[in-house]
Image (cartoon, grey):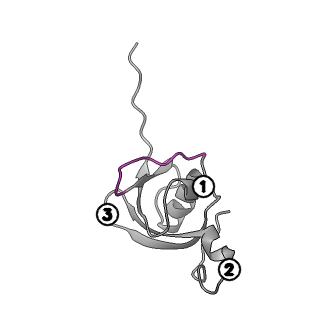
Amino acid sequence: MVKMNDDAGKGSGSSAAAVLDLDVIDVTASREVQARGVEHTTPAGSVARALAARMALPNDVPWALRHDRTGVILDEESPIGEQVETGSRVVLTPKSHLGGLR
């Protein structure tokens, strides 16, 4: 389970640095949420799935996160904190794979 809470970053100590606050929109820009207290070690794919559920998006679609400023699709296996910084805006987008040519 991905930890996201509204109390992250309050107080002092290293725990505040261990979490991220993100602004999240879906690819159609029709839904927007603020994700607070996302553990920086959580794989980006797990964060994407948790955010899709939180935004009531279809659960039969594989979701990915895209950094809004750079356009880079986050590596779903890598920790989210290694790919974006707190305060980033990310776009929740369905994964799409183009078929290879034979």
Circle 3 packing at 10 Å, graded few (<14), some (14-19), many (20+), is few
Which sits earlier in the primary sequence, circle 1 or circle 3? 3
Q: Position of residue 64 (x, y in %)?
A: 48, 50
- Give the residue at mark 2: 13
Residue 29 is tagged as 3
- What is the span of residues highlighted in magenta in the rendered image? 68-77
Rounded to the nearest angstrom, the CA distance separating label 1 from label 3 is 21 Å
Q: Quadrant of the C terminus?
A: top left
On whether residue 58 falls in the magenta region, the answer is no
- Give the residue at mark 1: 46
Q: State whether residue 73 is above or below residue 80.
A: above
Q: Quadrant of the N terminus?
A: bottom right
Give the overall secondary structure of the magenta segment: loop
User: Which of the two residues, 94 or 71, is positioned nearer the viewer here?
Assistant: 71
- Residue at 48%, 65% (x, y): give it: 56
Q: State whether residue 102 is above or below residue 10.
A: above
Is residue 49 in view from this perspective?
Answer: no
What type is the residue that disc 3 sits on? Answer: Ala
Viewed as shown, does residue 29 lie left or right of 84?
left
Q: Which quadrant of the structure image shows residue 77?
A: top right
Q: Position of residue 43 (x, y in %)?
A: 61, 53
Give the SS element for disc 1: helix
- Residue at 57%, 61% (x, y): give it: 50
Q: Nearer the viewer, mark 2 or mark 3?
A: 2
